[in-house]
Every structure is written in structure tokens, then in C-alpha cells.
Image (cartoon, rainbow, N blue to C red):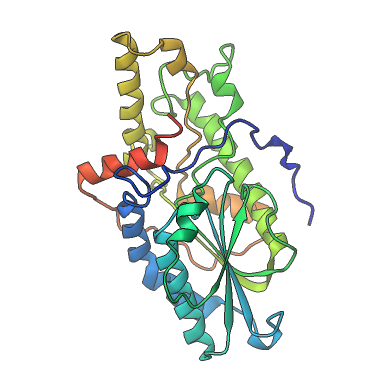
Amino acid sequence: MEIKDTKKISSSKLFSMTGGEGQYSYVNNSSFQKMGLDIAKKLMQEEITKKLDIDKNIFSPPNVFRIADLGCAAGPNTFFLVQDIIDAVKSKYESEEIEFQVFFNDHSANDFNTLFRTLPVGKNYFANGAPGSFYERLFPKASLHLVHSSYAIPWLSKVPEKVQDKSSPAWNKGRILYENCKEVEFVYAAQFADDFDTFLKARAEEMVPGGLMVLLFPSVQTEANPPKCIMVTIFELVGSSLMDMAKMGLVDESKVDSFNLHLYFPSAEEVKTIVERNGSFKIEKMQQLDRLMPVIEKLALVIRAASEEVV
């Protein structure tokens, strides 16, 4: 299968979650994401048991099972997730002889130093780093048995070009996302569809037949008005704050007008349409989980850890 030209991936500065282990680091402010993983854990393990369709006798090399976590950040959530996957695979195959190789992926600006410094003591897998954008090939053909990604898919490969073009109806003046503007929302949706299609084609090359991919990310209800959903509203507040700062003379308004987040939160129906049109994968299970309601102060720290470097 031919992969789309990846030269379209933005060559601008790459941003990561706030690194280190300080007060405002991602390591200490990713409780929202951990809540999602905890809710999804049972469902993920059940689907691994039922739908992973690989004969352990054909693991290559013998008895080696390869896992990739795409968009792993700096931990610690990725470590909990990887162990949950390993436990489910071992239970499915009823074997203690399988060896596990885990690839932790994020782009090159990620704090891999903190990630590998905090690897669990006594881990039962071989850990490897895989720097690079998951909107391009990262691994050899047919080399991965299970791919996972949580909370990373909404991050686009780049800001849609039209929202930065002053001559375009989608010029995003005074906003940093796509709230309350259908033209802007449309080009964000188109960028997501293009990026997710590229993501799927790359993974189809890298995964073995019968392998499984598990994706967890914030979405909006199909019948909902996306700009009014909580994740969009949260970042609308960030944009509003920046505009208030511009009015106070603390930052140039033109800088706020030129600043846009490369984030898009799709509906389940959008995801289903893209997967079916792509044709590389079959959806075995799609389920919208319970809405998360973290304490607002903690949520503010989560948003800061995720977007501080971008801002």
C-alpha cells in the first residue's frame, strides 16, 4: 500500500507536553488522561482477548510481541497502559514465555529523558524510543502486533493553512480554535480527515495481519454542536484570555490573530467515515465512554501542561 507524501507535515517548530518533573509538568498534571485510561482499561483488555487474531507460533522472532504507544509523552500514563496491554496478551495466550518489546513514540521535542529515567523498576518488557511524527512511517513493514494511542490523535500535523490566510473566509481572527465559525470548523475537519487517513495508511504498513490497534481520544457526540462541546470551550477560554491581554496592551493583537492551535475533536461518525473510506482497517468496537468531570483546578493544570509550550 502506498503512503501519502509526508512532505506536507509541518516543518515548523515542534512542541511537546511540558517536560521535567516540576509543578507544572505533564508528568504531574495528566490526571485527566489517566481517568480516561482507567475507564477504558476493561474494554481494551476484553477486546484484546476477543479480537487479537495472531497465532503465537508465528511471532517473529519466536515469542516476541511488539507494542507501540504513539504519542506517549513523558509518562507515567504510558507505563500503566503498556502493563495493562501486556497483562491482557499474556492472559490471552496463557503463556509466560512471550517476550515483549515496547516502542515509546513521540516527536523529537518530547522529554524522552524523563520518560526513560522514570521507567518502572522491574519492568517485564524491553523498552525502546521511536522519535518521529506518527503521521509518517515509523517502523518496518509488518513488525508491530499491537498499536495504541491515547489523547494524541486530536493533535493535527499542522495548523490548517486557510485559517492563517487573511484573504480566506476561514481566516481565524481573534480565535485560536474553531469555535463559533463554520468556515474555520470546516477546514479543521478537513485537516483532521487528511491527517487521520495518513495515520491509518502508515499503521497498515507497519502492523502484522491479525494485529490490533486501540485508539482513545476526546470526541464530540455526533448530534452535538462541536464548538459548544467542553474541550473546544476550554480552549475558547484560553483564546478569550489572550484577546483580553491584547486589549490590555500586554501582547500584540496581531500575534493573537496569527496564533492557532493544531487541535481538532471529531465525532464518532467522522472517525467511522474516515476509517471506512480508508479501507485499511475494520472497526471491531467503537464506544463513547462516560464523560470525565475532573476538578476544575486540576483540569486547568492539565490544559497548561498540554499547551503551555505551544502558547
Q: Position of residue 75 (x, y in %)?
A: 42, 57
- Residue 216 against residue 107 in the figure, above or below: below
Question: Residue 209 lies in what quarter of the image?
Answer: bottom right
Q: Residue at x 46, y 75 (%)?
A: 123
Q: Position of residue 14 (x, y in %)?
A: 56, 37
* Residue 230 seen in this snapshot: yes
Frontmost residue, 71 versus 286: 71
Q: Position of residue 201 (x, y in %)?
A: 69, 54
- Residue 71 against residue 213 in the figure, above or below: above
- Residue 17 against residue 161 in the figure, above or below: below
Counting the numbered discs, the total is 0
Q: Residue at x 47, y 73 (%)?
A: 85
Q: Position of residue 91 (x, y in %)?
A: 47, 86
Q: Quadrant of the N terminus?
A: bottom right
Q: Residue at x 46, y 11 (%)?
A: 254
Q: Quadrant of the C terminus?
A: top left
* Residue 216 seen in this snapshot: no
